[in-house]
Amino acid sequence: MNIGLREIEYILTIAEEGTITRAAQKLYIAQPSLSQAVKKIEAEVRAPLFYRVKNRLQLTQEGELFVETGSRILKSIRDLENSIQDLAHLQSGRLSVGMPYHLGAVFVPPAVTIFQRRYPNITLQLYESNSFDLENRILNGLIDLALIPLPVETPGLYSRSFFTSRIVLLVPQNDPLNQFARDPQDGSRRKYFDLRNAEGHPFCIGNQGHRLRKVSEEIFSRAGITPRIALYSKNIETIQRLVAAGTGIALVPECYLLRDIDQLKTNCYYLEPEQDVIWSIGTAYLDTGYLSFATQSFLDILNDLYGNHLSADGQVPIPHFGLSGIAGGAGLAG
């Protein structure tokens, strides 16, 4: 079988983009040339790799095997490149880092700034998606590591926790629910709220598949309530501002709170201990026994910034950029 790295990249890009047109644009080649290349590859492997569903290309079983194996081959090549560049003291090379939208917007910029200053010749590629997709991309060798909420759910990945955060309940200041908040008895800086008092109240909640949605559902289960969902959103900033506008209440990691949350006429409460779920942030990468120097260096930077640097109330000091000041500002999801 005469299949090269370029051909593997062709098939993986088509599988990711779903169409020949978008894949050709991403690969900077002509669409007819890419279509012809696919035919040659399918002839070489003696099996169809794609079939069409409406306007998108889906992988056949043979295609899935090709993508799975091809991804691992590309990961091995990247490991080889990085191993060689390690000997050259990182004078060139690349590192691919994944992150959920909101988490990346808040925590990754300081690490990127330090990394680029130390290693200006390393190409740093950032990829934003939800945690489930990021874990699969690590497993398939498409990215080197990801900064994500823990625990990881994909076998074969190694994770390292940097810090934890509590979940807070956001309630509009004029909402009658505020009367149920109790003063802390443990010296905490926030009042506590028994979520059972919110039974039947409208909630703003994350989309299916997002880690915050799963954590929220676990909290609902611990509290023994069935929430009334007002709306779903993948954007945690949007959820906070909708609560401030009186749309409903919401559960959000304390470390994700907007800088201006206190000015948004919103109260923040800790949950009762038996209802609380700890939000943990860390990194995930493939457990192959090898980490490139670039990967290890980025992990060290993250650890220096966030590892075990907890304040007296258990929160991590965040070099906060303020979400409203981040370019793009849209799609900040956990």
Image (cartoon, rainbow, N blue to C red):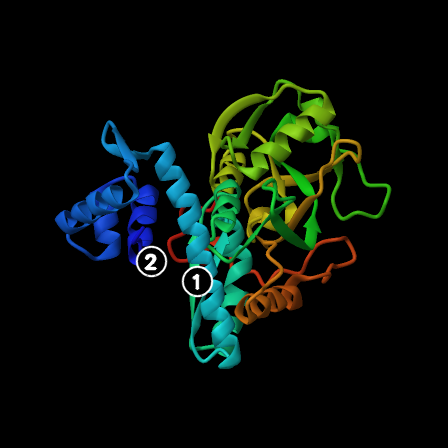
Q: Determine the residue located farthest toward the front in the rendered image.
A: 1
**Residue at x-position 29% and y-position 36%:** 47
232 left or right of 249 in image:
left
Q: How many marks?
A: 2
Point 62% across, 32% down: residue? 216
Q: Quadrant of residue 298?
A: bottom right
Relative to 17, is 330 on the left or the right?
Answer: right
What SS does tag 1 mark? helix
Query: 20 and 281: which one is in front?
Result: 20
Q: Relative to 300, is 129 above or below?
A: above
The extreme right residue here reads 185
Image point (23%, 42%), residue name: 43
Q: Are marks 2 and 1 in contact (CB under 8 Å)?
A: yes
The amino acid type found where label 2 is placed reads Leu
Whether residue 142 can be seen here: no
Tell me the CA gap for discs 2 and 1. 9 Å
First in sequence: mark 2 vs mark 1: 2
Q: What number is the disc on residue 5?
A: 2
Q: What amino acid type should be assigned to the residue bearing mark 1?
A: Ile
Above/below status of 263 relative to 231: below
Q: Where is residue 89 drawn, in percent x and y?
A: 51, 81
**Crowd rating for badge 1 (residues with CA inside 10 Å; few <14, some 14–19, many 20+):** some
215 lies left or right of 39: right
Which label belongs to residue 42?
none
Residue marked by disc 1: 77
What percent of the width, then of the height, locates residue 232?
A: 48, 30
Farthest residue toward the left? Answer: 32
**Residue 196 location, x and y as percent?**
72, 23
Q: Position of residue 299 (x, y in %)?
A: 60, 64
Query: Of helix, strand and loop, which one carries label 2?
Result: helix
Whether residue 313 is situated above or below residue 271 in the rendered picture? below
Instruction: For residue 29, say whether it is visible.
Output: yes
